[in-house]
Image (cartoon, grey):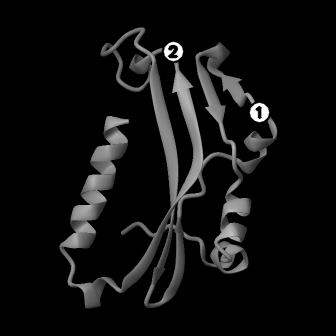
Amino acid sequence: MKFARVTLAACAVMLGSLPASAAGVDKLYILYCGEASATDQSRWSPGVNVGVPIQLSDNCYLIHHAQGWFLWDTGLADAIAATPDGVTGANGALRLKRTKTLAAQLDTNGRGRVAHRASSLSIR
């Protein structure tokens, strides 16, 4: 959770440092793309917080900017939403859950077809 807040804050600072005309972002939708819970945080930080449970959220971002729509991340698989209690992995140490599909949320926003065609990830 702390990592997610730090990451989101860093993104906000980077976007906030751009002039409005350069950024070109006029809409930002934060979509629910799943959640995870684990029985041991040390799975991600060996030797630290051994045996301490952790809850993680998975967000996706639908952005409208000057050049069109951009979908940042697609989250956990939509198929997980078909299992109300989620799915477990790692011998029960990790549970993944999704209550709404990404496709349904994009359709709700009226951007399903556009966003699916425009989704990408750019790393430089």
Query: Is label 2 in a helix, a strand or a loop?
Result: loop
Q: Nearer the viewer, residue 43 or 49?
A: 49
Local packing at callout 1 (Cα closer than 10 Å; few below 14, some 14-19, many 20+) is few
- Cα distance in 3D space between marks 1 and 2: 20 Å
Q: Could you tell me residue 14's position as x and y percent? A: 24, 67
Residue type at mark 1 is: Pro
Residue, far front? 108
Residue type at mark 2 is: Thr
Q: Nearer the viewer, residue 1 or 45?
A: 1
Q: Quadrant of the N terminus?
A: top left
Label placed on residue 10: none
Q: Nearer the viewer, residue 11 or 26?
A: 26
Give whichever of discs 1 and 2 has the lower sequence position.
2
77 up-or-down from 94: above or below = below
Residue, far top? 51
- What residue is rendered at 69% in x and 24% in y? 88
- What residue is rendered at 73% in x and 28% in y? 85
- What residue is rendered at 41% in x and 20% in y? 41
Q: Could you tell me residue 115's position as x and y percent? A: 63, 75
- What residue is rendered at 60% in x and 43% in y? 34
55 up-or-down from 20: above or below = above
> Which residue is labeled 1 in the image?
84
> Which residue is labeled 2 in the image?
39
The quarter of the displayed image where residue 37 is located: top right
Q: Could you tell me residue 100's position as x and y percent? A: 69, 49
Q: Quadrant of the C terminus?
A: bottom left
Query: Is label 1 in a helix, a strand or a loop?
Result: loop
Q: Could you tell me residue 32's position as x and y percent? A: 57, 51
Q: Nearer the viewer, mark 1 or mark 2?
A: 1
